[in-house]
Structures are given as C-alpha cells and as structure tokens.
Image: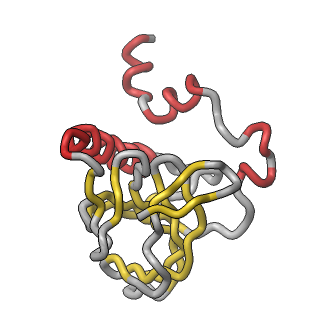
Amino acid sequence: MFFNRKHTGQDFINPISSDNSILEYRIIKTLGQGGFGTTYLCIDENLKRKCVLKEYTPHRIVYRDKSNQLKPIKSNLSNSYEIGLSDFLKEARNVALFNHPNIVRINRYFNSNNTGYFVMDYEIGNSLRVDNPEHADPPPPVIKLVFFPDFFVRLA
C-alpha cells in the first residue's frame, strides 16, 4: 500500500507506474511526492508533448487500490478527503488565473481514479527546493495572498 521515502522519513502512496495512462496522459515517470500530492512527467497523447500531472494523494488518509483508485483508509475520513479534494481543485482554478513567467501554467483539471488532477506545462529545470532551498517554502501569509486574493481585497 505505501512505500517509504527515506529522504523525508514519511511514507507515501505508491505512485501510478510508468506507461499507465490517466485519460490522455501517459505517465513517463514520477517526479516527486509531498504530503498531499504526487507529480508525474507525462506525454499528452492528443497534443504529443510533455506535460506535468499533479495528483491529489493525501497519504495520511487514503490508499491506492489495485485498480489505481484512491480510497480513504477509514470510512470516517471520507468527509476530510472530499473537503481536501475540493480544495485541491480550487487551488488549480486559482493558480490557472495567473499569467506570469514565474508561475507554471495550469491547463486543465479533472477528476479520475476517485481523486483530482491538474495538468501543467512541463518546464525544464530544477525545483526551487533544489536551486534555493532556504526559500523553497513561501511563508503562510504569501500563500494566503496568492491563493485567496479575493479575501484580502475585501479586507482592504
């Protein structure tokens, strides 16, 4: 059900293996995992180009079954999972509104395998965590301003 990532000391959900497809996105390899997401390098079989697919995988509350469906570990976690999934897709919609050279463009979001995905442009290069580790995680006020700008505009 899980595999261990020694560099973080946390267990994560097994990623979907290479050469599997989610809709028209064929997985080439897993790029990384975090507390709530798995990121894959893919080929968009319709457009014949590379892209990145981010999958909502909150490893503490779900597991992946043999058919690649995500399921809550316990039935009492279903509501938490659905709320998190909704927030994940709202994040995709909010980030998709940005048109800035320093923000990777989100092209699409969708539900499949009982979870959510968003499709991003594939940008060659290192992650911020590799290039500038002391600034890899923006402070919470910056995150709130980026993802909930309407709330802060109303306060002004």
> Above or below — where is 54 with respect to 23?
above
Q: Is residue 146 left or right of residue 154?
A: right
Quadrant in which residue 26 is drawn: bottom left
Residue 23 is at least partly visible in this image: yes
Residue 97 is at least partly visible in this image: no
Q: Quadrant of the C terminus?
A: top left
Residue drawn 51% across the image and 47% down it: 35
Residue drawn 79% across the image and 38% down it: 134
Residue closer to the observer: 103 or 6: 6
Q: Quadrant of the N terminus?
A: bottom left
> Above or below — where is 118 with respect to 152?
below
Residue 5 horizontal/vertical position (percent): 62, 58
Q: Is residue 91 left or right of residue 33?
A: left
Residue 146 horizontal/vertical position (percent): 51, 34
Residue 141 horizontal/vertical position (percent): 56, 23
Residue drawn 34% across the image and 53% down it: 62
